[in-house]
Structure formats: C-alpha cells, structure tokens
Image (spheres, grey):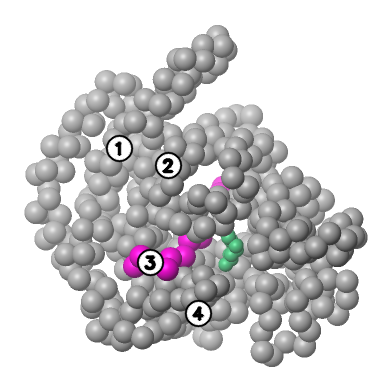
Amino acid sequence: MILDKSLIQQYNEQLAATQQKKFNFLKATLQDEGHDVTALLEQLAAFQIAIPSWALGTGGTRFGRFSGGGEPRSLEEKMEDVGLLHALNQSSGAISLHIPWDIPQNATAIKQLAASFELQFDAVNSNTFQDQNDQNYSYKFGSLSHTDKQVRDQAIAHNVEVIKHGIDLGSKALTIWLSDGTDFPGQQNFRRSFQRTLDSFQQIYDALPEDWKVFIEYKPYEPHFYSTVVADWGTSLLFCQKLGEKALGLVDLGHHLPNTNIEQIVSRFLMEGKLGGFHFNDSKYGDDDLTVGAMQPFQLFLIFNELVEGMASQEVQNPALSWMIDASHNVKDPLEDLLQSIEAIKIALAQALIVDRKKLENAQEQNDTTTAQEILQHAFRTDVRPLLAQARLESGAAIDPLAFYRQNKIRQELINQRGVKTYSTGL
Ligand code: RM4
Ligand code: MN
Ligand code: MN
C-alpha cells in the first residue's frame, strides 16, 4: 500500500494548533534550561532506525502463531510496509534482511523499489540456526562451531553468500547471531568450540569487503539451555578483538540475564571502540522481543545516556552505530508495534540529549550522588513527545503516526489487498 502523502498533510493540519501549543511550552522550557532546540530537532529528525524484514508479520512462539491478517507475503510487500512506516514517521528509512527468509531474487529491481520508498539496506543477517531443505549437513549440533569441518564450511559458505547479497543491495555490514551452544554439561569442550568458531569467524571476516563490518551478537541462552558459544558481551568483545577492526559487538537488549546493567556494557564497548550497533526490544524475563520501552523505559534512557555521552566524548573512538529493532509480536499489529517502538527509542534519545552534561560531570566529581540522580531523573521525567512530534511535522511525517494509522484503517486496507490468511517468512 502506497500512502498518499497529502493525507498526512491534511491530518497534520487538524492537529497543528494543539501541537503548536504543546511545542511552544516545551521549547520555552528547554531554552530556559540552555538547550538549542533547533539542534535537538535536527538530531531527532536525522536519527533513523532499521526495520528487520522478519518483524512485519505476526511472530509466533514455539506453541503457535496467530496471523493478524494482511501480512506481507513477499520481500516486496515487506518493503512496502517499511516504506509505509517511514512515510508515517520519517524515522525508519532502512530495512535489514534475514537470509534465507528474504532472498532478493532481482537485486536491481529490489534496490529500485527501496529507492522509491527512500529506504536503505541496513546490515544483512545470516541464519545457521535452522536447517534449510536444500542443505547437505544439519546444524543440529552447531554450525560455525561444529565439530565436523564440513558443517563449519557449509555455514561459512552461507555467511559469505549473505555478504554477496548484501553487496548487491548496498548493505555495509553482516550481523552474525550464532545460536550454537550446548544443552547439557559435558556436551562440548568450551575451549575447542571457541577455537573452532574463531577459525570460522576469521574466514568470514576475510570475505568482507574493505568498507564492511561484521557485528557479533551475543545471547546467554536459547535455543540452547546450558551454554552458548557467544554467550555474553565479554565473549563477543574477545572474538572482535581477535578478528580485527571490522569486527564489532552487537547489543540486543533482550540478550541479557535479568537485571544485567546493560548501560555499563554499552559504556565498556564504546570505551574500546568496539560497539557496532543495537537490536532494540524490551523484555521482562528473557529474549521476549516485546515492544521497545514497554517494560523498562528507564533502562532504555540510561542506555541512550551512555551513548550520547560516549559518542560525544573526545576519549571515545567508535565507528558510527547501526540501529535496528529486533522484536516480533503475536498479539499486536506488527506495524503498530513498530511505530510504538520507534517512538520509545526516540523518546529515550531526546531525553538523553537534554541531560545537563556539565552539571552531571560536576556532581560526579564532587561525589554529589543526590544531584547526579536528580539530573538524570529530571531529563527522564521531561515529556519530550511534543519535540518528537515537531521533528515529524517538519519532516513531512504524521504528527501522531499511530493515530493516523488507526484513523485511516490501514490494517483493514492491507487485509483487503492481501487477504486475511497471509503469512510472512520469519520465526
Ligand atoms: C535471535 C537474535 C537474532 C535474530 C533472531 C531471529 O534471538 O536476536 O538477532 O535475528 O533471533
Ligand atoms: Mn537480535
Ligand atoms: Mn533475540
């Protein structure tokens, strides 16, 4: 479905007066506090978050899947959905493909289609956590870490193939989430499986074009329940340090054990110049893949606080980061969920941008814990939503994308076009 942009304009006109009132109040408050509101608006408008091609359909659990209707049936329709999101919020100008779930059959045509929606191709993702019908060897006992060289070679070849697809589309990074691990104590020798994985990573690394990066994503458990080869940020960092400068760590917010201090991990990665990017989602227990900000918005803010501080610091030399949502839903409309996630990310970014850095540093030097806490909480408790709405208004997006989506019955329209019983590739 291609959105008629004049509809957005008409819609914004209805909301313009209320938006103006709210924005003027916030603008005056922020200016009093010494912020450059124009610069803030620019930073917010420029911030783009990639949408994964597997988040546009209803996600399943291992117990079942309930399609919401009107799901995209092909890569082209998935791109159409991302284009729709981008038209609504001007903040999701990139798509991240998972291979082989979404293999572009005709790269030139797909690139043209992407350009028509003003979309770029973000990192490409490999998949050696499932067996495909046409493969020779099974990944049941691992892929890049497998004891059998033939299995490892097959998994390496798949990653090289994914890089090739990425090159054709103009991607600049490969994300490897390696599901390899064990379910029972004694099943594998930890040291040897690390060494085998390092050797496999090295071969993939060697196949990267000059201007590419590889992101090594970590995850403590699932699908395996005793050990995971790339279990945590320390292991990811270790691999990256051994591989070289193109290898960077990837933080998926759901890939931590409960109560982990993720913001400190972010700071450590940045300190070493080894942070590649994020997979945003939220969780209460594990890799729940819930809507960003649905459970722990304060944690999200604290993560952005580290990012904003770190990226601006002279002491930090880290390449530009890659931002992506990695969530999948079985009860919500995926497009509504993505709109909410993007909003939550941008709220956290805006709040982190208005932290009084000088005062905070001063409080830290003085060991004034109370003031330090007050400064962070003041930013976190500021309602920055009118700022986000203003950035959208000024970039031609909808003031309130979710309300627009509902008002224009977009899901119903997608169902009319695609049918009720449609299923996207993905989990
Ligand atoms: C994993 C991990 C990967 C994602 C798959 C679908 O848990 O988060 O990034 O590609 O799920
Ligand atoms: Mn992920
Ligand atoms: Mn995950």
Which marked residue is nearer to the observer: mark 1 or mark 2? 2
Q: Position of residue 118 (x, y in %)?
A: 38, 66
In the image, farthest residue toward the top: 366
Q: Secondary structure at mark 2?
A: helix
Front residue of 367/309: it is 367
Q: Is residue 286 magenta?
A: no
Residue indicated by mark 3: 331
Label 1, ligand 2: CB separation under 8 Å: no
Provide the residue designation for mark 4.
425
Q: Is residue 117 left or right of residue 417?
A: right
Q: Earlier in the sequence, mark 2 or mark 3?
A: 2
Identify the mark nearer the N-term, 1 or 2. Answer: 2
Measured along the vertical axis of the image, is residue 300 above or below residue 371?
below
Circle 3: element type: loop
Q: Please indicate whether residue 338 sits to the left or right of residue 310 in the image.
A: left
**How many marks can you see?**
4
* Mark 1 and mark 3: Cα distance apart in space: 28 Å
